[in-house]
Amino acid sequence: MENKVALITGAASGIGRATALLFARNGALTCIADRSADGLHETLEMVQQFHSDAIAIQTDISSRSEVEAMVRRAADRFGRLEIACNNAGIEGEQSLTAECSEENWHRVININLRGTWLCMKYEIREMLKNGGGTIVNISSIAGLLGFPGIVPYVSSKHGINGMTKTAALEYAGQGIRVNSICPGAIQTPMIDRFVGGQTEERENLIGMHPMGRVGNPEEVAEAVLWLCSDKSSFVTGQSLVVDGGYTIR
Ligand code: NAD
């Protein structure tokens, strides 16, 4: 990672923040992006303890012009873009498929699926200028299995795995590797919002993980680091599951 230019979206919180910190600790020139200015500022201060050369770029990944500007800003600051972790996402509202509102559908798909595609679009263009790079998209075990009550989220995460394979095929010959990670339940503000204050819901969720616990954001960040590093140089188009065994039942 030493002096590699890395862009991480959704870095104001949870998995994105943990990834930004791990990248900076490993010497990356870290560009962090999020729509939340406050959280982004907090992450920047934390990242700068490891590597002073870091920038924060407030970005809504569902805006084409903001995503284009985000990638340009990173490349202008450091002269290139070599690594990207497209992590920003939302869970949306919970409702059965027949009750899901169009508004909820559009909001989740627009951020999670279209937003991740927009990020890849501009990142790939930038990476091609310098002979390649690596991209890791954060999907979910909801990108592999059905989950009642969150049809837009499940659809967006299945879509991310499909986009990952497609882009991996398209750019394998040009030095760009594209992979995704499918985390199980990870202790972040998203999972707290998802289970609400309900202890029973939380216990049920934990019980679905053979390891008997949810994961930590740092455990996902380690997988991102590996997939973004040269140590995974022959791996592309894969969806790496980091779920404490949830999907092996
Ligand atoms: P989180 O809510 O803690 O962090 C998500 C971050 O994304 C926030 O900082 C938020 O401001 C940002 N974000 C949301 N919409 C954005 C937008 N339009 N533009 C820019 N930034 C935006 O959640 P997390 O758990 O860290 O989730 C990170 C990723 O991991 C998400 O894609 C999520 O779907 C995925 N994931 C999480 C879990 C889990 O259990 N926590 C499991 C599987 C997958």
Image (cartoon, rainbow, N blue to C red):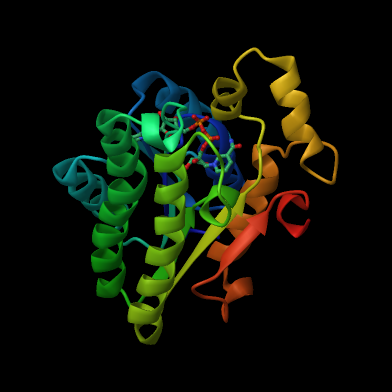
Q: At 68% from the left edge and 15% from the top edge, which residue is drawn?
A: 198
Q: Is residue 63 left or right of residue 147?
A: left
Q: Is residue 184 left or right of residue 142?
A: right
Q: Is residue 213 left or right of residue 36?
A: right
Instruction: Return the x and y of residue 167 as percentages of the image width and height.
Output: 36, 72
Q: Looking at the picture, tell me which residue is in the foreground, 243 or 199.
A: 199
Q: Is residue 112 visible?
A: yes
Q: Which residue is the extreme one toward the bottom?
A: 173
Instruction: Return the x and y of residue 95 as percentages of the image width and height.
Output: 45, 28
Q: Is the N terminus in the top left, top right, bottom left or bottom right quadrant? A: bottom right
Q: Looking at the picture, tell me which residue is in the foreground, 48 or 67.
A: 67
Can you say whether 79 is above or below 166 in the image?
above
Q: Is residue 34 left or right of residue 182?
A: left
Can you say whether 214 is above or below 166 in the image?
above
Q: At 47% from the left edge and 46% from the top edge, which residue is drawn?
A: 154
Q: Is the C terminus in the top left, top right, bottom left or bottom right quadrant? A: bottom right
Q: Looking at the picture, tell me which residue is in the foreground, 221 or 91.
A: 91
Instruction: Return the x and y of residue 160 as percentages of the image width and height.
Output: 42, 57
Q: Which residue is the extreme one toward the left?
A: 65
Can you say whether 217 is above or below 46 in the image?
below
Q: Looking at the picture, tell me which residue is in the foreground, 37 or 155.
A: 155
Q: Residue 170: which quarter of the image? A: bottom left
Q: At 74% from the left edge and 36% from the top edge, which residue is drawn?
A: 214
Q: Residue 190: which quarter of the image? A: top right
Instruction: Return the x and y of residue 49 as percentages of the image width and height.
Output: 57, 33
Number of labels in the image equals 0
Q: Is residue 57 visible?
A: no
Q: Which residue is the extreme one toward the front?
A: 98
